[in-house]
Amino acid sequence: MQKQLGAEALGTFWLVFGGCGSAILAAGVPDLGIGFLGVSLAFGLTVVTMAYAVGGISGGHFNPAVTIGLATAGRFPGGRVVPYIIAQLIGAILAAAVLYVIASGKTGANLGSFAANGYGAASPDGYSMLSGLVIEIVLTAFFLFVILGVTHGRAPVGFAPLAIGLTLTLIHLISIPVTNTSVNPARSTSQALFAGGTAISQLWLFWVAPIVGAVIGAVIWKAVGETD
């Protein structure tokens, strides 16, 4: 199991370092900035690359909500949920720490929200707590539904990482203005620890909503998509 946990930590590190790193280091660079379209693509690419690299070792969850959703759907042993989540948190926090060191090395650096998630005044475009709660639940539910579908035995072999990465890209394209996109409690926790303040006080939503959404997605899949 140590190899699986190591793969989850590495995969989650890459997701946070690549996705949040693109937001912190590259999104707002004058004339060269990649914008939220580039950040969305970066998050998708992290999942594609690591799912192909270590998905065969650990399953390529890289997200506590995904782990819980897969367990709910009967695709993952319940006894491994907590160790997987711990490994994911370790990978995410280490990535955030490395990003903090890099971002702090620029003269006059203003780290702002440090790519944290938020609602209300902390929402990129001022969306309410209810808006954040609903969009995080809905998008995580669909994320789990897609994951369960593309990893089913009847799905085309070898394309699951690509489909999952594209889905995460789409999710970010929809929800960056609302919450800065979580659908992943490990990603949210890692950034909140360094952003502090409001990011910490609002972190509860980015655990509750993705987990609720993941469970809903799993239940819907079992009712609609799980066939003999």
Image (cartoon, rainbow, N blue to C red):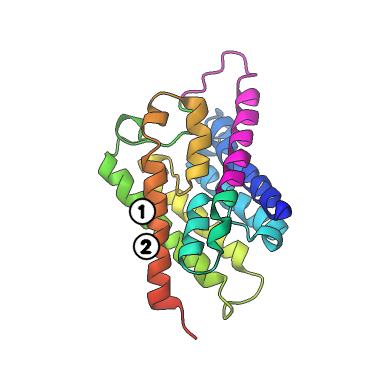
Q: Are marks 1 and 2 in contact (CB under 8 Å)?
A: yes
Between label 1 and label 2, give the one nearer the viewer: 2
- Left or right of 19, for residue 5: right
Spot occupied by residue 19 in the image (x, y as percentages of width and height): 57, 42
**Compared with residue 187, is residue 192 higher up or lower down, i.e. above or below?**
above
Q: What residue type is labelled 2?
A: Ile
Residue 12 highlighted magenta (yes or no): no
Residue at point 42%, 62% (across, down): 142
Spot occupied by residue 177 in the image (x, y as percentages of width and height): 38, 41
Q: What residue type is labelled 1?
A: Ile
SS for tag 1? helix
Spot occupied by residue 137 in the image (x, y as percentages of width and height): 36, 53
Quadrant of the image for the N terminus?
Answer: bottom right
Number of other residues with Cα within 10 Å of mark 1, as a class: few under 14, some 14 to 19, many 20 or more: many
Residue at point 32%, 47% (across, down): 133
Residue 137: image tag: 1
**Compared with residue 217, is residue 207 higher up or lower down, i.e. above or below?**
above
Quarter of the image for residue 128 reads top left
**Compared with residue 152, is residue 53 higher up or lower down, i.e. above or below?**
above
Residue 196: image tag: none
Q: Nearer the viewer, residue 223 or 151?
A: 223
Q: Which of 174 and 48 is in front in this view?
A: 48
Which SS does the magenta portion mostly show? Answer: helix
Quarter of the image for residue 80 reads bottom right
Residue 216: image tag: 2
Spot occupied by residue 172 in the image (x, y as percentages of width and height): 46, 49
Residue bounds of the magenta highlight: 85-112
Residue at point 64%, 50% (across, down): 8
Q: Nearer the viewer, residue 86 or 179?
A: 86
- Left or right of 102, for residue 146: left
